[in-house]
Amino acid sequence: MPAELRNVIYFVAAAMFIFGIKGLTHPRTAVRGNMLGAGGMLLAIVVTLIDKEILGWQWIILGLVLGSSIGGYLGVKIQMTAMPQLVALFNGFGGAASALVGGAVMHELISKGESITTQGAVAIAATGLIGAVTFSGSIVAFAKLQELISGKPITHLGLKAANTALTLLGLGLAVMVVMNPQAAWAYWLLVVVMLGLGVLLVLPIGGADMPVVITLLNSYSGLAACATGFVLNNIVLIIAGSLVGASGLILTRIMCVAMNRSLTNVLFGVMAEVGDAPSADEIYAGKVKATTPDEVAMLFDGARRVLIVPGYGMAVAQAQHAVRDLAGLLESRGIDVEFGIHPVAGRMPGHMNVLLAEADVPYDQLKEMDEVNSTMEQVDVVMVIGANDVVNPVARTDPSSPIAGMPIVDVDKARTVVVVKRSLSPGFAGIPNPLFAADNCLMMFGDGKKMVLELVGALKAG
Amino acid sequence: MSDSVLLLTIFGLAMIVGFEIITKVPPTLHTPLMSGANAISGITIIGALVAAGHEQTWLTVVLGVCAIAFATINVVGGFLVTHRMLAMFRKKG
């Protein structure tokens, strides 16, 4: 195949990726967009197989069969609640593949006795740096999300020094690879150092900050593929990799804005200490009103507008189907039901939306935070299910609070708020929530799924 | 224009196109966007195919096969799970 033809086909594949992602700008066109992306990938793979002088078909088939069976199994079997873990794992595999390709190319060129250009050497070093840190960081993120290791934030003074040391060491080795591209050992040492750095970078980060970590690693996995493109002088890798890199960076920014924290603060910072803020006892004492499903069912009798605000607790309790039943029942009584979704609710961007879509809630019923906030005063009943910090009015009122300035769903402005929660325990930010003690707030203590089901039962009986 | 500059230009333009399109993806589709992006980042499989297929040394074959396996998991798993998710999004009524 002439090089021109090959490059034209690579260009077509790259264009298919771009239009594929463009399809994701609307749920109606998204399925087609994803298929277009898959088609682009198939095209790029087939052209590569036809074009390059492939000798070892058996090896290629081995790799493809292995990968397809594992990928196919995960893709078909995975539970929707486990999506954050899966995406974390896939980020890591992308990084690992890129780092391995970087090393393989280096060894191939060395063994052929060909010289490695400066561009090639810089790109190889970049592939190792980004790929390795993406792999180990993602594995740790996966382990945290899968709860194989604690999701609690870890702070240790020595970590910062260790991170700095590893970063400098990694960069030093990268320079060595560029100066002397024959030194394969320097590349692999670089990979080992960056694997260590990835672990240390993600280990200290707490569960609720995972959306930022996953989006950032998503971006890295794209940039690693992009660096591989510079190693191979291949435009389709560069284009596809930068699309993914851009996507991850945008999502990372959205997540940071939604928490009113800078990226550095999420990655290296500790949440501000709780100052002399009132303690939980002072806020809650005598003011918290507990309620029952029967009472809440009566509350809905006079309601015209209901807003449901889900949080990570809904995912943990697997309550999405029960919530859908509740919403359907209320709608059948002529009540206007909407969902208000905070951008960082859950463990990854769009986590709540996918769970509710799985439970068959139509996507046009899922509203963004700003949209529901503008009409909050007209909402008769808000049901908060498994959310805490993202509905804490302290973010608006107390500038010394660790979550000060974070945009929240202003549920406290609705006529009545019902909070479904196991107990009064604080959320990730570790601070009490004055919402629970507000005059218009009722607490329905218990497991999210169980309480919502009981509520559905009470509504049907009433 | 040297090759490196050309490639950097393509990189820059692709980032710009990426930013322009992806800012228009609604929050409701952010999870499928991430898993779909994962699948696309599996494009590194092209490098892996070449590395394994050339059979230069046993080491490059081993590295290449591992890379193919990792990248294929991304490609196959990523597109499949994204499809599954997107198929669930439906309009009211």
Image: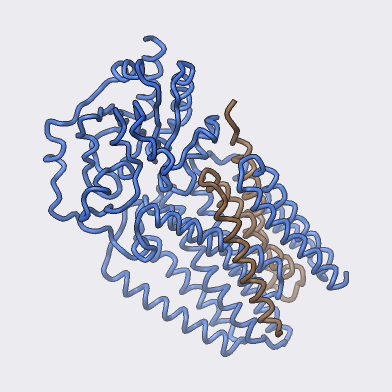
Quadrant of the frame with the N terminus of chain A: bottom right
Residue drawn at x 44%, y 41% is: A371
Camera-nearest residue between A270 and A199: A270
The reply, left or right, for residue A340 in relation to residue A95 is left
Q: Position of residue A331 (x, y in %)?
A: 47, 21
In the figure, A402 relative to A392: above or below? Answer: below
Q: Residue B74, image x and y in percent?
A: 62, 54
Within the image, what quadrant is residue A294 found in? top left
Where in the figure is residue B62, as x and y percent of width and height?
66, 68
Residue A301: x %, y % from top left? 35, 15
User: In the displayed structure, does residue A403 sit left or right of residue A221?
Assistant: left
Chain A's colour is blue
In the depicted view, which residue is nearer to us: A183 or B77?
B77
Q: Quadrant of the C terminus of chain A?
A: top left
Where is A437 relative to B33, above or below?
above
Q: How is the image coloured?
A: by chain
Q: Is residue A70 visible?
A: no
Residue at image location 78% in from the left, 57% down from the top: A43
Q: Quadrant of residue A180?
A: bottom right
According to the colouring, which chain is brown? B
* Residue that sits furthest to the right in the current view: A1
Left or right, residue A274 beside residue A339: left
Q: Is residue B20 in sight in this rendering?
A: yes
Count of numbered circles on the image: 0
Q: Nearer the viewer, residue B26 or A189?
A: B26
Identify which residue is drawn at 20% across, 30% down.
A439
Quadrant hosting residue A106: bottom right
Q: Is residue A121 above or below residue A402?
A: below
Vertical side of A173 occupied by B81: above or below = above
